[in-house]
Image (tube, grey):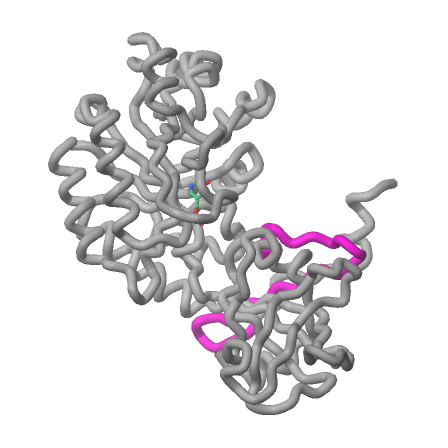
Amino acid sequence: MNWNELNKLPTPCYVIDEAKIIANGEILKNLQAKTGAKILLAQKAFSCYDLYPTIEPFLAGTEASGLFEARLGYEYLGHKEVHVFSAAYKANDFEEILKYAGHIVFNSPRQLALYGPKAKVLGKSIGLRINPECSTQDHAIYDPCAPGSRLGTTKAQWDEHMTPELISLLDGLHFHTLCEQKFEPLARTFKVVEEKWGKYLHKLKWINMGGGHYITHKDYELKALEDFLLYVRNTYDTQVYMEPGEAFVLNAGYLLTTVLDLPVNSETKLCIVDASGACHMPDVIEMPYTPPMVGAARPHEKEFTYRIGSQTCLAGDVVGEYSFDHPLVEGERLAFADMAYYTMCKSNTFNGMPLPSIYVAHANGSLELIKSFGYEDFKYRLGK
Ligand SMILES: *Cc1c(COP(=O)(O)O)cnc(C)c1O
């Protein structure tokens, strides 16, 4: 990344780091080559389709959460597999999804009964999402195994509703229960899947282990994952799929912003920037978490600590506290890091905030503006 160049860009803007996407992709490609597993891009995390040609060599296809993502995957990577899962399909959407997706995963026996037979006749590969009810994380908002979850069919629901006819429609099973997790929670979850559904696994063409795998993280136990994927393939003679989103673009983006003001407050040093947690990195507020920042440390590790928040009038629109080895000044540039996933695809114009432009820092060193936004992008969703 050429920071001299980046520091000249108008803010706020996202910068996608193509070289890092390629580095992540090599890890995923290598894993597929070694294990025979197929890896799909979960588009809900990252769907900047201008980068799909960059990612293409590293994936077996795309995964969609519904009609629009399925269409995008089909339009830009249609020569690869298109998989779709939705908690419930609408009849009209489903007709169109049949044009785009080769693999269709249903959430409940009811939806499978409603749409499965027709999809099957059209030659689609059919799956059911199961809920192993094995919680391995503390963030209820990201835990499909949390009590009362609507995501996936539990074993009790399976036993009650999955008739032999419905079971015979199935080509595969799907589970997605992790979020930013390493190998051990996957192994623990799969043990439960084996206990509850093991006898079916032998008969199925595929098993999809969802996303949330931190595969490209520097501490991920890749060797253990490889052994595990080979074990599953050899034991059940089945095709394994994984569909990470984040892992494809981990550490592959920045959100550049400018210091606008440094209001004085008796207890805390404050800093207002032209980027917003609520609008441009909603997971900061929803999860919540504090993203890394280039050149900054955790509060009080360096001499000058600031609470950094946005221009919006939402009191809680604070990105976090950071420390610096110098006092901040107005006009200074700050760069939030690891900003490629769950950001551009989730950004919004609440408070009339502008959407950040999107740049790509190409692997060859060139910088390209792929999209900029203006007043119309705020206005057009709200009326005539
Ligand atoms: C969110 C999601 C993914 C991708 O999750 P990441 O945490 O981005 O890897 C994959 N599959 C399903 C069904 C999902 O809901």
Residue found at x 44% / y 66%: 251
Q: Where is residue 24, by image quadrant?
A: bottom left
Q: Residue at x 50, y 83 (%)?
A: 301
Q: Is residue 354 magenta?
A: yes
Q: Can residue 76 be seen at all in this image of the molecule?
A: no
Image-quarter location of ligand 1:
top left
> Image check: 346 left or right of 249?
right
Q: Where residue 192 sits in the image (x, y, percent)?
A: 25, 34
Residue positioned 51% across, 76% down in the render: 298
**Where's residue 323, x and y in %?**
56, 81
Q: Where is residue 223 in the image (x, y as percent from the top left)?
A: 18, 57
**Is 291 left or right of 376, judged from the image as shown?**
left
Please, which residue is most extreme toward the left here?
234
Q: Is residue 238 above or below residue 288?
A: above
Q: Is the magenta stretch mostly helix, strand or loop?
A: loop
Residue 71 drawn above or below residue 12: above
Instruction: State the residue at coordinates (53%, 56%).
Output: 50
- Looking at the rendered image, the quarter that the C terminus falls into is top right
Is residue 316 in sight in this rendering? yes
> In the current view of this chain or complex, which residue is farthest to the bottom?
326
In this view of the protein, which residue sits in the foreground, 107 or 119?
A: 107
Q: Does the segment drawn in magenta span residue 366?
A: yes
Residue 156 x %, y % = 35, 19
Segment tinted magenta in the rendering: 343-367
Quadrant of res 190: top left
